[in-house]
Image (cartoon, rainbow, N blue to C red):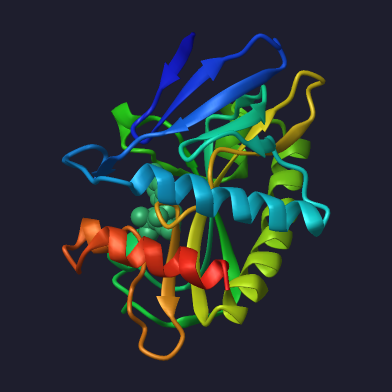
Amino acid sequence: MLLYEGKAKQIFSTENENEFIVYYKDDATAFNGEKKAEIASKGILNNKISTIMFEELAKEGIESHFIKSLSDREMLVKKVEILPLEVIVRNITAGSFCKRYGVEEGIVLDTPIFEMSYKNDDFGDPLLNDDHAVALKLATREEIDFLRTQTLKINEIMKKFFLKMDLKLVDFKLEFGKDVNGKVILADEISPDTCRLWDVNTNEKLDKDRFRRDLGDLVQGYEEVLARLNK
Ligand code: C5P
């Protein structure tokens, strides 16, 4: 049964009440849904790339909702209740950071920046700090401390992993959820929809900015990422 439909994925219940199926759609949206398109095979690529990323993180001891891949577009995951927070790490300036603070794109930051925004389309996912998140009861202070530590650990693992494929991890967004025991674990997806990835030598953008900014064929970029991950 369909439980939830987001912009890029659908969540289905299964016979096991502790497990869900995530179905990756071909829909692409940007700017809070203002720009929309259907891009054939994007869902397949994101499912495959997310699978590789969750498996890689598991090898490094990072628990996530991922259980196994079921088909081209589907993965079996643990049932979690998603925290209404988008957790972002920035290694290199880009996107909303440049726009908000009037900074040039492509500046390597001395230390990674950890950001959170309130997952709420009606308010345009506003940026918030720890105090805001606690006051709004979106998470406890302990949970936020865990999110920060875990996300920065994930950043180090992913940065190293992508660099081996000649990809710079510019920034990315993660979502976490509470499992049936109340434990906070990594959830959602890790794909070029949610990570900015640039070629180390040319700075060619191989992520969703191709769609957001009309920089070239999106599928070609995602296929290039998958091909490098499969090498
Ligand atoms: O747009 P912004 O620069 O804040 O995005 C930072 C990172 O988070 C980018 O990698 C982007 O793809 C990702 N992101 C996302 N979903 C959102 C907002 C940002 O995956 N709703």
Measured as percent of width and height from the top left, residue 177 is found at 65, 31
Given residues 8 and 99, the one toward you in this image is 8
Where in the figure is residue 128, as x and y percent of width and height?
Answer: 49, 43
Residue 97 visible at all: no
With respect to residue 163, does 220 lie above or below?
above
Q: Residue at x 49, y 44 (%)?
A: 47
Residue 49 can be seen in this image: yes
Residue 140 located left or right of residue 40: right
Which residue is pictured at 56% across the width and 24% down the height?
A: 21
Most foreground residue, 71 or 121:
71
Q: Which residue is located at x 53 percent, y 44 percent?
A: 189
Q: Quadrant of the C terminus?
A: bottom right
Instruction: Tell me: residue 144, above or below residue 112.
Output: above
In this rendering, position of residue 94 left or right of residue 171: left
How many discs appear?
0
In percent of width and height, residue 105 lies at 33, 77
Question: Which of the 4 image quadrants contains residue 120?
Answer: top left
**Residue 219 location in percent, x, y?**
30, 58
